[in-house]
Amino acid sequence: MNRIEIAFKNKPIFMPYFPLGYPDLDTSIDVIEALAKNGADLIEVGLSFSDPLADGPVIQHATQIALEKGITVKKSLAAVKELRRRGVDIPLILMGYYNPMLAYGLEKFVRDAKEAGADGFIIPDLPMEESDEFVGLSHDSPLPLIPMLAPTSSPERMEMIARKAKGFVYLVSVTGITGERKSLSEGLGELIAQVREHTSAPVCVGFGIGTPEQAREVGEMADGVIVGTACVRTIGGSKSPVETAREFARSFREMLK
Amino acid sequence: MTLLPTKFGPYGGQFVPETLMPALIELEEAFVSAKADAAFQAEFNKLMASFVGRPTPLTYAKRLSEKLGGAQIYLKREDLAHTGAHKINNALGQALLVKRMGKQRVVAETGAGQHGVASATAAALLGLECVVYMGEVDIARQEPNVFRMKLLGAEVRPVSSGTKTLKDAINEAIRDWVTNVNDTHYLLGSALGPHPYPTIVREFQSVIGTEARNQMMMDAGRLPDTVIACVGGGSNAIGVFSGFVDDEQVELIGVEAGGSGIESGKHAARFGDPSKGRIGVIHGTRTYVLQDEDGQIAETHSVSAGLDYAAVGPEHALLRDLERAFYTSATDKEALSAFHELCHTEGIIPALESSHAVAEVIKRAPTMRKDQVILVNLSGRGDKDLNTVMKEMGNL
Ligand SMILES: Cc1ncc(COP(=O)(O)O)c(C=O)c1O
């Protein structure tokens, strides 16, 4: 069993997102370690890009700071290695935009990511239509590219995308960019049910989930709850980020029990 | 899956979040059906004639030709199109598609403000709601156009992220589009972005090349030897090139923004600076992009807001690989000097973007014979640039 499969043995799982390099590289490694050791079941480790067009202001700001402080793909991969050295053994999924991966060299990126101890990839600007060159590369190092679905996806696309899903399906719960929302989108349960018709892979919901209460509600329907903006805002805005990360992870873990 | 090819050789494609894919598919369907619909074509052509004032004239630049002492120079006068630039051709075409798709709201990005003005104009004409995203740096340097957009009923939203120029305005327009995609169309202003935009924009701008070819045959009785256009995203260039691309003997030249000079690093010459201009993916398309070693998009510089962008339309990347078109650059200084030259010798105040094309004419015409002909696409007029030029003259 790989790390992702193990993580999904106890559902629903809690998946926070946090970008490496924010507020600085050392702190971000400590934060991710703290999240992992206090209840996160899987972490989306963010790679920064200058033009994150699927992200709202909070994540834009955080990744901008990470870039100003000198984060690179290379340093990010080294950070993943460091997290493994510290005994973090939950799945770490690299989430980032395509261009920095292209610039690094796709083949080398996939190889180095695997060697560093990453478990998969989420690339918001790489839809099914364009993913062949990336998926083809990871054949001999089968780290999954996590497919994304959205409320706007047609039934045909849902089927095509979900059917081939490896790892899990990332269901974007709102039509929009990352950021907290006051309430959950209507029809989420139905959307999840539609996806489940086409795949037995776990279905995780992200975008817009900000509070442990919302997480619990989503957790009753989905196999995993992804929390990005709220995680970045709460921890990044704190004077003691590591402490806050511990509490943050515990509060969501508690609610998802 | 798609009705049309999504790529130009290895370039182009659809690198967007899943949320937007259905909208791109819907847009492609609307475009393909409109193209085959005689009523749509008739409506577009009628607006081009009765509203935009097409065909725009072809002007023989007699005094400039004589002064340079080489090739005969003809100007395709997109500056005389309603709203002052070629951007209106595409804005109206897409706005008609918006009506066809039954959407009510458009968002647009703008650099120089010309595409913003064109979008606001098309929206006013067709009764659509219009929001234009514009970088704060560009708002400051293209102020008259900001006021024009507001007069036309558009809302102008300043963009303060990143470099505060065209690239960041596109980011914000896309974010708005992702959020409101159910009732909103992204009225993209250049031959850029994910498929089908580069193809749609070329189609609506091809009117420039079609007219220019006919006019050259009528006025000069022959094809030009060389066609020159400035290249921001590449829409005016691809529009005029499309009229001549099958005429193998016609040389096609695109002019990028050389800014303070390639060696200074402050420019927007995607093809001109191999140290930073490499194949990458930005704003939904694979093409040449100015970037650092880590794949972060580079800051760009140009005196002209409309050329101040880190990526070039994907079809230009292919034309260059095929050596069907060639690309060069003109610096801020060369463009400003060409600007003054055209004012003085021809009585035409060109846009600073178009002045880059004129700068190349000034370099090239003297090296050509008197019986040779250059056609330059004068993509827009310079009214919007008077503040910038005044400031630059003060600095000289
Ligand atoms: C007058 C004029 N010419 C050229 C451009 C550059 O755009 P493109 O390369 O798409 O023609 C602009 C863009 O704002 C413009 O306003």
Image (spheres, grey):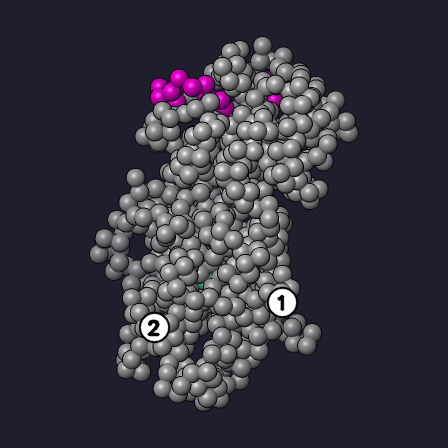
Q: Is tag 2's residue or tag 1's residue first in the polypeptide sequence?
A: 2
Instruction: Report the side of B32 relative to B291 (left or right).
Output: left
On whether residue B360 falls in the magenta region, the answer is no
Q: Where is residue B298 in the image (x, y as percent from the top left)?
A: 59, 53
Residue sitting at the far right? A239
Q: Residue B260 carries which label?
A: 1
Mark 2 crowdedness (10 Å alpha carbons): few <14, some 14-19, many ≥20? some
What residue is drawn where x is 43% and y is 67%? B326
Asked whether residue B226 appears in the rendered view, the answer is yes
Instruction: Report the side of B46 relative to B378 (left or right).
Output: left
**Badge 1 residue CB within 8 Å of ligand 1:** no
Q: Name the residue under label 2.
A: B250
CB-based contact (under 8 Å), mark 2 and mark 1: no
Q: Callout 1: residue from which chain?
A: B
Q: Do labels 2 and 1 share a chain?
A: yes
Q: Nearer the viewer, mark 2 or mark 1?
A: 2
Segment colored magenta: A195-213
In this rendering, is residue A214 above or below B294? above
